[in-house]
Structures are given as structure tokens and as C-alpha cells.
Image (cartoon, rainbow, N blue to C red):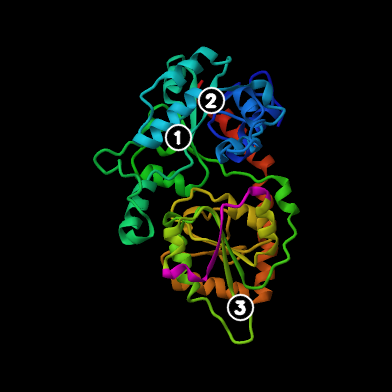
Amino acid sequence: MKSSPSDPQVLVVQNGARHDYAVPLALAKAGILAGFYTDVCGNHGLGRGASLLTGLPGMGTTMQRLQHRIVPEEVLPFTSTFPMASGIDHFLVESMGRSSKSRTLGWLMEAAGLRGAKLIYSSMGWSPTFLAHARSQGVTVVTEFYVRPSLWRVHQQEHLKFPHWEASMPYPYLNESNVARRGPVDVSDHLLAPTLAVKEDIIREGLFEGDKIHVVPYGIQQGAFAVENQPVPGNVLFVGSCLIVKGIHYLAMASHHVARPSGGVQPTFTAAGEVTELVRQQPETSLINFLGRVPRREIAALYAQADVLVFPTLSDSFGMVILEAMAAGIPVVCSPYCADVVQDGISGFVVEPSDTKALAEKISLIIHDRALRNRLSQAARLRTRQFSQENHGEHLIGCLKQIVETTS
């Protein structure tokens, strides 16, 4: 999508490398990126120097991850990083459960300027002080709200049902009387959500006007279609952190119900993602082979051999692993909370995670009915073609232009 002189210049404010910097890259290619403010990356500023040291003994995984935070060449000239202030902000949020009392990050961004932008695209309201300043200058703020705001409550409720799966109560600083999740919406004029489920959750929580919440699905890189899936029959794969909010306990329970016919396909269960010893030691997880954290470059090998991906999450807003698996031709069994991509019964199945018998039935159906599995596989690859990064970029830019037109 080419830009015109009337198109809005957009300043992207994003901590982390979300989807390999897909948003600033799409805007840069369209000629409407005014600037890109981020916390730290491996090819700019202090992060560039730190990433060169990651091969030295004693360097932690956080430093090593900088090597995978590489801002695209098209975006690099527009990039400013704020590593020290972002680190302080992150520490206060993680340790105290609230937005940083320190305004240093916001002040530094203010000093860096608005870059002539008519609109700011913010990732989850980062940084609120700067966004409030931008709005005071008449700049429209659009925030990508990619987490269901009820997540904290869902996770706490699940913990109370299964307290022996996790060592402590999640989000202990949050309850109905002091919930501190309004920050992003209080500094935003419009919100973007990756799925209808997230939009509906925001409305249900009473956080924002429905007509100012826009659904823009994510896209997937073309390379995901290069994975050649040669499935090992019965190979059931889970990708993600092995938490109860991701539904790992329900997959574990379902694994004991999956059909094991004599002489037929025998199911195996593999989980790729961070896992605690507490989860490993649960009797229900005895059939799951936990690989622990797997580097992204090695995930493709797991997709290549997977027969079915099971993603019974209670929390995810989209589930990029679903797109990745489907692009490789892997049928998916997922929860309704991130099922916008999956066409139930066509490219996979949508199942309520807590219904472990239904979950087991759908897994069994796919691994034992090879003709059905092949049909689902073909439909999955076809479906994901609609969710390319190019389509995401066009949809996003069209949405931002429409917002500017309605607010100008």
C-alpha cells in the first residue's frame, strides 16, 4: 500500500519485538512511519553493544535474546531505544504490580519528540506518561490491547481450582476492588484488538466504547509456509508456557482419555515451553514429554513431525502458534478464546478446554482418521493464506487511516 501526502505519519511506541517488529515494518514500507520508540534491541544503541557480549561465559538468557531482537533495516533509521529507563519501568511493574512511579521513560520520550506524527500506535499503553503528553498535544493515540483484560481473574480462578499446580496465587496484587488495568485505556483514543474475543472482553469489562475498538488480526511470515510437515502419526504437540492458564492441566487430563487401540496409532504427547518442576511432577502429566524452553529456530523441526497441535488456552488473545502450525499443514484443536483463525470442523476443532473428554475425542479423531486429518491439513494451509503479514499490514494501515479521518 503506497502512501500519499495526505496519509498520517505514525509514531510506533512498542516495548519488545512483537511479531518481529511487524507493525513498524509495515508502516515503514508504506512510507508513513514517523518514528519507532522501543526499549532495547540487538542492533541499535546500548543493546547493540550488549548483544556482542552474549557469547561470553556467564551472560544470561536475557542478554542472549538480544541477538534475536533485530530491528528490520527499513525501520532502523527511525529507531530510538530507551534501555535503562525501560528496565526500571519493567522492574517496578513486575515487582510491585503497577505502572512505574518513575516518569523517567516518559520524559525521555518527550525529549525525543513526537516526530511530526498525527497518530501514535502504542503497544499495550507503553509508555502512559508519554502517551498522555502526546494527547495533550492533539495527537491521536491508538493502543493495541492484545491481552484479554479478564486474564488476571481467569488465572486466579483456575489457580483456586487447581492450587497444587502452581506455587503461588497469580497476580496477587489484583482483586475486584483494586484492579489496576485501566492504564492503557485511560491514555487511548482508540483500541486495536487481534480477535473479536478480546474486543468483547474489553466491552464486557466496561473499559472502552465498542465503536472505538477495531479488530485487526495478526499475520504470519511467508517462511512459515516453508515447513514441510511429514507427520508422525499420533504425535500430539503443545507449544507455549506450561501454565494452567494455558490449559496444560486440561491437556494432561485429556491425554489419559485419548484412544489407544491395539495395533493402531499410539499417541505421544510433547510440550515445548517453559515448565516448572511442580507441573512436571503432577500425576496427570505422566504421559507428556516436557522439552522445556525450545529456541524458535528449533520449533520448525517440531512442527515438521507434529500430527496435531493442541492449544487449550484460557488466556491467549490470538495464539500465533496456531497460525504457525496451520501454515505447516497441521490440524489444530484449540479453545474458543483464540479461535478466529480456526474454522471448526474444517481446518481444525474448537473445544472448551475444561471439557477434557471432548478434547480427547477430537484429538483421537484426527490421529486415527487419516483421511480426515489430510482434509483438515489442506484446509489449514489454505486458511492461513488469508493471514499473511502483507494482509495484516494493509488491514492495519487502512484502519489507522480511517481513525485519522474520523478524528480530524
Residue type for callout 1: Lys
Q: Relative to residue 35, is residue 281 depicted above or below?
A: below
Residue 128, located in which quarter of the rendered image? top left
Tell me where residue 121 appears, x and y as whole percent. Answer: 53, 28
Whole-number angstrom distance, CA of label 2 to CA of label 3: 49 Å
Q: Residue at x 65, y 64 (%)?
A: 306
Q: Earlier in the sequence, mark 2 or mark 3?
A: 2
Q: Secondary structure at mark 3?
A: loop
Q: Nearer the viewer, residue 27 or 353?
A: 353
* Eye-nearest disc, 3 or 1: 3
Residue found at the far bottom of this picture: 262
Label 2 or label 1, whichever lies nearer to me, is 2
**Tags 2 and 3 touching, CB below 8 Å:** no
What's the mark number on residue 212? 1
In the picture shown, does residue 178 fall above or below 372? above
On the image, numbered disc 3 is attached to which residue? Answer: 266
Range drawn in magenta: 283-297
Q: Position of residue 48 (x, y in %)?
A: 65, 27
